[in-house]
Image (cartoon, rainbow, N blue to C red):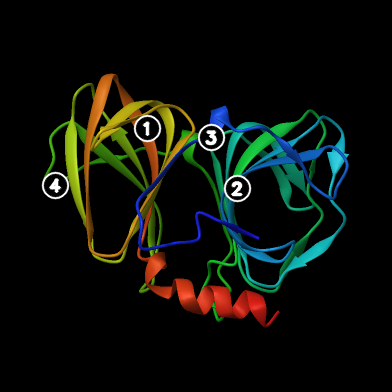
């Protein structure tokens, strides 16, 4: 299966406009943003757990990264309410579910294979620092290594920011709205821009809160190759 699989192109998806598609697990539905592969896939997805749903225990051979958008995600490591940012590295395992239901933004098979760093952050309980270059923008760092960087951007009303995405960029609007080129991105809108692109953002009148990831698209071909060989 291939969805938005041409990584040389800019892609915008307003995910709330997509139909929910049933997954192989009862009570777990998905909205695919990009995907290369079948059930084992390099994938970016919005996933909805119905109340009381649970996944079978499994190993994330290629790693799993997710942000809780709504409700409370649960596994044997704890309860993770909205605003939680989790990184389960390659070869980690868990038994996920949700007693009351939840919605999460998930990325699979987009790690470096040697990464073994677990991250569990409740972003609503930590602050942010003012951006050094752009007025009205505050940054909450979530993760950074030699391969990639992940953060939250907090925009005041009408604040502007430009990113030179030499290694590509990807963002999800969590709150408010953001204008980028001719598109208005609202809550749960997703943007992926290719290598050597520029991202020119301007927040709407109510500001915006944005999840941002850069760097990882330099390794797309290797990520896809690892999926095929899994």
Q: Earlier in the sequence, mark 3 or mark 1?
A: 3
Q: Position of residue 97 (x, y in %)?
A: 80, 43
Q: Which mark is residue 45?
A: 2
Does residue 78 appear left or right of residue 18 in this picture? right
**Residue where numbered disc 3 is placed:** 15
**Residue where numbered disc 4 is placed:** 132
- Answer with the quarter of the image where residue 155 lies: top left
Q: Earlier in the sequence, mark 2 or mark 1?
A: 2
Does residue 27 appear left or right of residue 197 in this picture? right
* Few, some or many residues within 10 Å of mark 2 (<14, 14–19, 20+): some
From the viewer's perspective, is the residue at label 3 or at label 4 nearer?
3
Assign a secondary structure to mark 4.
loop
User: What separation in Å lies between label 2 and label 1 (alpha carbons)?
Assistant: 19 Å
Q: Earlier in the sequence, mark 1 or mark 4?
A: 4
**Residue where numbered disc 1 is placed:** 209
Q: Please name the residue shown 23% across and 57% down the image.
A: 197
Q: Earlier in the sequence, mark 4 or mark 2?
A: 2
- Answer with the quarter of the image where residue 26 lies: top right
Assign a secondary structure to mark 3.
helix
Q: Please name the residue shown 35% across and 65% down the image.
A: 215
* Few, some or many residues within 10 Å of mark 3 (<14, 14–19, 20+): some
Q: Residue furthest top?
A: 205
Q: Earlier in the sequence, mark 3 or mark 4?
A: 3
Instruction: Quadrant for the C terminus, please.
Output: bottom right
């Amino acid at each position: 299966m291939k969805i938005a699989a041409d990584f040389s192109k800019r892609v915008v998806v307003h995910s709330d406009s997509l139909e929910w598609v049933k997954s192989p697990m009862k009570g777990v539905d998905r909205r695919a943003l990009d995907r290369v592969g079948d059930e084992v896939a390099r994938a970016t997805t919005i996933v909805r757990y119905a109340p009381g749903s649970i996944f079978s225990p499994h190993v994330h051979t290629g790693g799993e990264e997710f942000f809780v958008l709504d409700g409370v995600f649960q596994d044997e490591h704890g309860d993770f309410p909205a605003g939680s940012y989790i990184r389960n590295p390659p070869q980690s395992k868990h038994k996920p579910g949700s007693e009351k239901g939840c919605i999460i933004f998930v990325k699979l098979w987009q790690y470096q294979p040697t990464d073994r760093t677990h991250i569990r952050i409740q972003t609503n309980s930590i602050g942010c620092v003012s951006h050094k270059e752009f007025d009205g923008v505050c940054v909450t760092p979530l993760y950074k290594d030699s391969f990639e960087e992940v953060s939250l951007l907090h925009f005041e009303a009408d604040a502007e920011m430009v990113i030179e995405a030499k290694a590509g960029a990807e963002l999800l609007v969590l709150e408010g709205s953001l204008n980028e080129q001719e598109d208005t991105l609202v809550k749960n809108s997703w943007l992926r821009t290719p290598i050597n692109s520029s991202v020119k953002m301007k927040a709407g009148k109510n500001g915006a809160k944005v999840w941002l990831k850069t760097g990882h698209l330099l390794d797309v071909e290797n990520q896809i190759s690892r999926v095929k060989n899994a």
